[in-house]
Image (cartoon, rainbow, N blue to C red):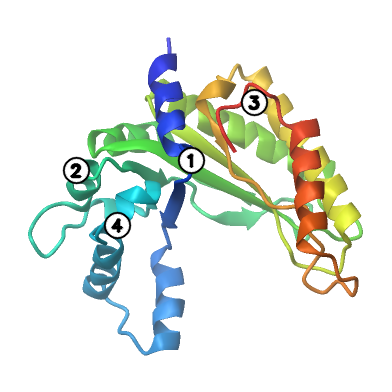
Amino acid sequence: MINQKFLVDTVKRLTLPPKGILAIDESASTCKKRFEKLGVPDTEEKRREYRELLVTAEGIENYVSGYILFDETLRQKATSGASFASILQSKGIDIGIKVDGGTVDFPDHPGEKTTKGLEGLDERLKEYKNLGATFAKWRSVYTIGENTPSESLMQANAEIFAKYATLCQENDIVPIVEPEVLMDGAHDLEKCHQVTARNLQVVFEGLKSANVYLPGIILKTNMAIPGEDSEVAVGAVEIAKSTVKCLKENVPPEIGGI
């Protein structure tokens, strides 16, 4: 039996207005790219110094409810010798961990990607729980094209999300489910709305069929928004209305948070 109360209480803390969740879960390769642009040496110590600035920022607990960390970061310490985890806990900030292993090619579907990382996930979640984690994040990506995203990809990712979410909840960890429809392309607002709507339907069908406890999860979603190369300008209000409409019509009302 999962601890429903723990999951719901954690979701409530993470989604308490006006706070938000801060993702500092850049992988070593992503950090390397960003550091190179700034002329910063790409070393573990420099990554530690960068994360320490974010973890120890004075008063940050007034604005941030949870930090999503990278595996390396969860194990690091501040200059004082205190672990990052203990510093966040002392501020009343929940500790999250990115647990997916990044994207890989989806077989027989050129240009489409699925997400790896299920192998050994249960053992990793148990370790992260012991290190202080109360929530986790898993991301899958979808590109809008002439024939993408395919129904096959959406179904495959939904099955992966369901397995991930189930393992999280069994380990008293709130799963953040992130099915991200990317902004790449020239598609219009309506196309993104349609694709996002269908994808959300598939994702939640998969979660429900696996008996995932929906009040104990958080959805991290893209907006319904035109592609970066779209020639049609759309205002912020129209984007907001389309996004809210998409969520209200396709996300079960019992979900813990968005």
Residue 207: mark: 3
The residue carrying mark 4 is: 72
Tag 3: amino acid: Leu
Q: Where is residue 51 drawn, in percent x and y?
A: 29, 64
The residue carrying mark 2 is: 90
Which residue is rendered at x = 37% and y = 54% of the image?
Answer: 70
Q: Distance between the residues labelled 1 and 2?
A: 20 Å
Q: What element carries label 3?
A: helix
In terms of sequence position, does the residue under pointer 2 or pointer 3 come before the other? 2
Q: What element carries label 2?
A: helix
Q: Distance between the residues labelled 1 and 4?
A: 29 Å
Please name which of the two marks, 1 or 2, marks the residue nearer to the observer: 1
Q: Is mark 1 on a helix, strand or loop?
A: loop
The residue carrying mark 1 is: 17
- Looking at the image, residue 40 sits to the left or right of residue 89; the answer is right
Tag 2: amino acid: Ser
Quadrant of the image occupied by residue 182: bottom right
In terms of sequence position, does the residue under pointer 2 or pointer 4 come before the other? 4
Q: What crowding class fits label 3: few (fewer than 14 Cα within 10 Å), some (14-19), or many (20 or more)?
A: many
Q: Is residue 183 at least partly visible in the picture? A: yes
Which residue is rendered at x = 19% and y = 49% of the image?
Answer: 87
Q: Distance between the residues labelled 1 and 3?
A: 26 Å
In terms of sequence position, does the residue under pointer 1 or pointer 4 come before the other? 1
